[in-house]
Image (tube, rainbow, N blue to C red):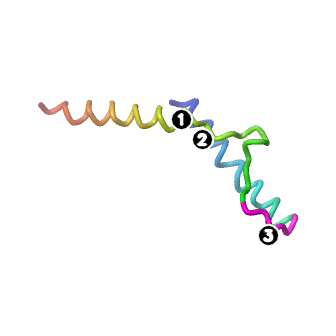
């Protein structure tokens, strides 16, 4: 899960940097969507599914411990 978590953090860290570039530095208010994927920070699509599966496994483990 560390790889997926790192990819998510990288993706979300890159976004405010690009947002600042567009809105504050370039004074661009017309661009409606700001994407960091083309800059090498694609959203890690597999991370969502892996986190959900891990959560379900952990939840099931915790809830069955006392039985």
For residue 34, above or below residue 36: below
Q: Which mark is residue 29?
A: 3
Identify the residue under disc 1. 47
x, y percent for residue 57: 33, 30
Q: Quadrant of residue 32?
A: bottom right
Dot 1 falls on a residue whose secondary structure is helix
Left or right? Give the position of 42 relative to 51. right
Q: Nearer the viewer, mark 1 or mark 2?
A: 1
Q: Which residue does the image show at 72% across and 58% down from the upper left?
A: 33
Left or right? Give the position of 15 relative to 25. left
For residue 13, above or below residue 65: below
Q: Main secondary structure of the magenta part?
A: loop
Mark 3 neighbour density, 10 Å: few (under 14) some (14–19) many (20 or more): few
The boundaries of the magenta stretch are 26-32
Identify the residue under disc 2. 8
For the residue pair 49 and 67, the one nearer the viewer reads as: 49
* Inter-mark Cα distance, 1 to 3: 31 Å
For residue 53, above or below residue 28: above
x, y percent for residue 53: 40, 32
Q: Which residue does the image show at 82% across and 59% down from the upper left?
A: 21
Mark 1 neighbour density, 10 Å: few (under 14) some (14–19) many (20 or more): some
- Labels 1 & 2 near each other (Cβ < 8 A): yes
Mark 2 neighbour density, 10 Å: few (under 14) some (14–19) many (20 or more): some
Q: Nearer the viewer, mark 1 or mark 3?
A: 3
Q: Which residue does the image show at 61% across and 36% down from the upper left?
A: 44
Dot 2 falls on a residue whose secondary structure is helix
Q: Does the magenta-highlighted stretch encompass residue 2?
A: no
- Labels 1 & 3 near each other (Cβ < 8 A): no
Dot 3 falls on a residue whose secondary structure is loop
- Labels 2 & 3 near each other (Cβ < 8 A): no
Q: Which residue does the image show at 14% across and 33% down from the upper left?
A: 66
């Amino acid at each position: 899960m560390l790889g997926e978590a790192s990819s998510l953090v990288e993706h979300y860290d890159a976004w405010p940097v690009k947002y600042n570039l567009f809105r504050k530095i370039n004074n661009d208010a017309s661009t409606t969507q700001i994407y960091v994927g083309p800059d090498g920070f694609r959203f890690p699509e597999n991370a969502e599914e892996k986190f959900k599966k891990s959560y379900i496994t952990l939840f099931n483990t915790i809830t069955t411990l006392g039985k």
